[in-house]
Image (cartoon, helix red, strand yellow):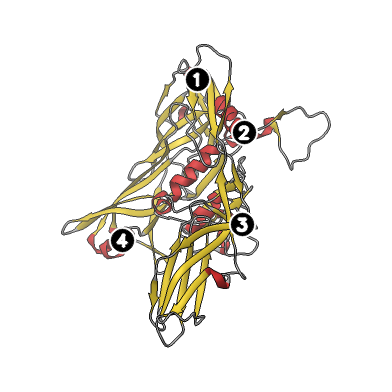
Amino acid sequence: MSTASYQLEYFASAAWHTIAAGSILDVSGSWETSGGESGVAFGDDTDASIDGELLLAEWANLAYITPIRYTTTIDASTQRTFTGVLTKRSRDLERMSFTADGMKTLIAATKGYSPAINRRPVATKTTASSADDPSNPGWASGLVNWLLWQAGGRPYEQAGSYPSATFYYSCDHALLAPDWAWAAGEDAWAECLRLAKDSGGQMYQDASGVVRYKQILGYGGQSTSDTLTESNYATIEMDESPGVLLATKITCQYVPRRRLGTQQIADDTTPRPIEPSASVTIVIEPQNPLASLEQASAGQLKSDALVVTSFDGTPSTSYTHTLAVTAARITIVVTNIASVPLMIWRVRLRGDPIVAGEAGSVSADSGASPVVERVLEPSPYIQNRRDATRIAQMTQAFYASARPIVTVGGCVHAPSRAVGAALLLSCSAWAMSAVKHVILSIKHDNTGIEAGYTLSYVEDLPKSDDFFIVGVTYTSGQNKYLGW
């Protein structure tokens, strides 16, 4: 007989605090990716949530967006199975209930403005030494990493250096490195999903609370010893629509981006008075994103960028300013250090804009009949024919038809299993023995002992080991495909 216990914690004052077991009346949770008809999908979304009922005394500790985490122990196996933020709560005279959703809620609320990133993979591999900190002069991470960092995440592989991080993330190396990429105040989670879709990857939160960017090439190639046989589940069902053709022809559009030479990118003539010792903030959003802004020195504009006078029209330099530059927004804070009021008459900026070129499109066609064409959603990150061809061919290879979806129930909950992980499924009635599937969803009951899983067949997916990969050493006689 398996035994279960759990620990529920909330984050406050830069530390995690345990909610006493006697205050917890009920807890249940679920984790899943959307998957679609194909089971796995580029840019796939994830939903992780947990619901609980507590004694009323905990109300004061659990405000909106308070980080929550949940750890499950089944026999000798202990694993964190949820990390998220509180999104709903209610109470009566004796108890309270709450709902917490995954970290994508917090990430989506982040509206970041990034510098322009030139020809760097949209996601870069996180390691114990990867340079993900944007404040570090050696910063070298992709835009996905940057967005997750701005939301409070830190690399999972560096968790020891960031013990109090709001959440952790882990990224594979992306296949897409656009000429120019930038964030301009969008919903950060939606932007991560778009970058994942364009690069043939997925974004999801696993059961341990780690937000992951994963190349789908890794699904078929995962090694696993985790098994699920008739003795491990009570029910099993399969849904399959092998005749459903998602596409025989994939069309992808692209819009080139190029950097122009230094030119005027803003001319703001709004009069702005500044009282002595006061400051004024000026926000400039140029028509096109910027590769760079002309400056006298780091963080300082040239003297002719600002036209400042006293109220009698006498030119003045009795001011200081700070400068924050991103691709889509420039923020200037001007402080009056004179003893008289000053007036800013003009802000004139020069820089190197990034502009769009003539659009084009490419198609990947299997030649099958009838022709079922799918036109991919246009994206600012698909910027040349090469990248458009790659994503069209990958989409055609992965999603020519729907794949089987298996639902199993009545399993003993294994805390170590996570969404996106592989396991070997056996079912003698289907003549299936140790066939590789990937976990799309996990649900557990309020005791934490029983779980159900949704699985997708991935044995036939292209995998990393099938291809020659740049940076890997090979020996004579090895036969592999040339990849994307």
Q: Which residue is drawn at 43% across and 67% down?
A: 282
Tell whether 409 sits left or right of 300.
left
Give the residue number, with chain letter if any, for mark 4: 62
Label 3 close to label 1 by CB (< 8 Å): no
| Residue 37 position in % (x across, y down) | 44, 26
Q: Report, in whole angstroms, how far the alpha carbon at label 4 lies from the one at label 2.
A: 50 Å
The amino acid type of the residue labelled 2 equals: Arg
Q: Is residue 74 visible?
A: no
Give the residue number, with chain letter if any, for mark 2: 385
Mark 1 or mark 4: which comes first in sequence?
4
Q: Report, in whole angstroms, how far the alpha carbon at label 2 lies from the one at label 1.
A: 48 Å
Q: Report, in whole angstroms, how far the alpha carbon at label 3 lies from the one at label 4.
A: 51 Å
Give the residue number, with chain letter if any, for mark 3: 262
| Residue 230 position in % (x across, y down) | 46, 27
From the image, which quarter does the C terminus lie in?
top right
From the image, which quarter does the N terminus lie in?
top left
Q: How many residues crowd around disc 4 within 10 Å: few (fewer than 14), some, or many (20 or more)?
A: some
Can you name the residue that lies furthest to the front here? 313
The amino acid type of the residue labelled 4 equals: Leu
